[in-house]
Image: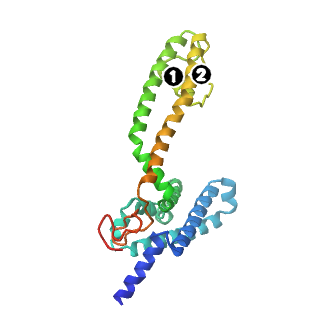
Amino acid sequence: MKTLIQNWKSKLHEIIYEADTPAGKLFDVLLLITIVSSILLVTLESVPSINYKHERFFDISEWIITILFTFEYLLRIISIKKPINYIFSYYGIIDFLSTIPKYLSLIFGGAHVLIILRSLRLLRVFRILKITRYIGESDKLMSALKASRVKIIVFVFAVVILCLILGTVMYIVEAGASSGFISIPRSVYWTIVTMTTVGYGDIAPVTTLGQFIASIVMILGYGIIAVPTGIVTSEYTSQYKIKQTNTRSCENCGTEKHIDNSRFCHNCGDKF
């Protein structure tokens, strides 16, 4: 009997936590459809005219989806040997927060509370982040972003300093021209807007020297935008040199991203 239960839990774990099997892929597709449907319902419900006509439909649909999410959450807890690892994991917390709002609406009453609950229910949008753990390219992108974060931080810091310098220069050049550069912070704001190629147009230089400097800032903007892209692209390319990982999730501790053909969990050492 004990062996039968263990086999059942192992099979359930394989379906829920892994995407390399047909059953696992089907589960992920159904979960994604449910998540997208939930997001669509919450989005439509926020439109007063639509919500007024279909309020009962939205309420029933919300309960159906909430029950499905609850069932999925419980199955994830049941199918892992150490449930505490999942409950307090990143995705475990997101799953919990995106499930409880509908239940909280039964406990708390009052219009002001319902507004808070409506905002809290939008946390269910984060459930879609669960799917990214099954997409290898997303893992590579996240790894590339993490690997390049120091370079990007240094680059952003340098850009901020450049904006301060150029903003101060524009303030000095345009100070007496009544062109909107009334302070250094406002001039820095203009520099950031111009350098990022947004260009609101609420402030514009009127002096010849100011317009010349503005032209330089615009040209710098195009070059600056390309730098972070190059940094991340370089790191992203290097990710392909790293050993490929699969979607296998350890049944004991819940750790993911194991190297292909590995026989043991790289975190707890449990045998697959």
Considering every residue shown, the one lying at the far bottom of the view is 1
Q: Secondary structure at mark 1?
A: helix
Q: Image height check: is 57 above or below 228?
A: below
Q: Amino acid at mark 2?
A: Ile
Q: Front-most of 204 and 149?
A: 149
Residue 229 image position (x, y, % from top left):
51, 39
Q: Residues within 10 Å of mark 1 (few under 14, many from 20)?
A: some
Q: Quadrant of residue 219?
A: top right
Residue sitting at x 45%, y 77%: 12
Label disc, if present, on residue 62 of the rendered structure: none
Q: Front-most of 40 and 130?
A: 130
Q: Front-most of 77 and 61?
A: 77
Q: How many marks?
A: 2
Q: Front-most of 142 and 105?
A: 142
Q: Secondary structure at mark 2?
A: loop
Left or right for 47, reference 24: right
Residue 122 image position (x, y, % from top left):
53, 56
Q: Which quadrant of the figure contains the N terminus? A: bottom left
Q: Amino acid at mark 1?
A: Arg
Q: Quadrant of residue 263?
A: bottom left
**Res. 212 visible in picture:** yes
**Res. 126 visible in picture:** no
Residue 258 image position (x, y, % from top left):
39, 64
Considering every residue shown, the one lying at the far top of the view is 176
- Colour logic: rainbow
Marks 2 and 1: in contact by CB < 8 Å? yes
Left or right for 62, reference 97: right
Residue sitting at x 57%, y 68%: 29
Circle 1 sits on which residue? 186
Residue 242 image position (x, y, % from top left):
41, 55
Circle 2 sits on which residue? 203
